[in-house]
Image (cartoon, rainbow, N blue to C red):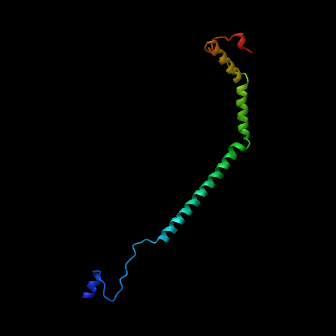
Amino acid sequence: MNHDETANASGSVHEGEAAQAEQDRPNSAVILGIVAVTLAALSGVVAGVNELFKATLGGEISAKVLEPPSSALRGLRAMEEQKLSRYQWVSEEDGVVRIPLDRAIELTLWYHRAGSPADPDREPGEELIR
C-alpha cells in the first residue's frame, strides 16, 4: 500500500480535493411532509370509522325500534298479555289459579296493609273477592 492509499484510508484529505462534509441538520421539509401526510391519513381513517359507526347505528335503530314487530313477536306479546290479564287455571287438581296482574297487586297491598302475610292456606275475606 503506498502513501496516498494509506492517507485516504486513514481519513486524511489530499491537498487538491475539496472536503465535503455531511450536513448534520435533518431536512425539515421532508419531516414536515411526512407528518402532514400521516395526520391527513389518520384524519381520514377516523372520519371513515365515524361514518361507518353512524351507518351501522342507524341501521340497528331502524331494525330494532322503528320497524314494526314480526308476527311471531306480536303473537308472543298477545299470549303474555292474555296470561297477565285473565283468570286461568294453572293446575285445577292442586287448586292453583292464575289471576290478573292488577288483581294480584291489589291483593298483595291488602295483605300488606292488613298486616297479615299472604297465606295460601288462608281463605281471603269477602272483601277481597270480586
Query: Please, is residue 123 above or below residue 82 in the view?
Result: above
Q: What quarter of the picture does the N terminus occupy?
A: bottom left
Query: Please, is residue 17 above or below residue 66 in the view?
Result: below
Residue drawn 68% across and 43% down? Answer: 64
- The residue lying toward the viewer, choosing from 107 and 44, is 44
- The residue lying toward the viewer, choosing from 11 and 46, is 11
Question: What number of labels is visible?
Answer: 0
Report the side of 4 relative to 54 (left or right): left
- Kindly tell me whether residue 100 is visible in this rendering: no
Residue drawn 72% across and 29% down? Answer: 81
Residue 38 percent location from the top left of the image: 53, 64
Residue 121 percent location from the top left of the image: 63, 12
Residue drawn 37% across and 79% down? Answer: 21
- The residue lying toward the viewer, choosing from 35 and 72, is 35
Query: Please, is residue 95 above or below residue 78 in the view?
Result: above
Residue 47 percent location from the top left of the image: 60, 57
Report the side of 18 relative to 71 (left or right): left
- Kindly tell me whether residue 23 is visible in this rendering: yes
Q: Quadrant of residue 68?
A: top right
Residue drawn 59% across and 55% down? Answer: 49
Q: Quadrant of residue 51?
A: bottom right
Q: What quarter of the picture does the C terminus occupy?
A: top right
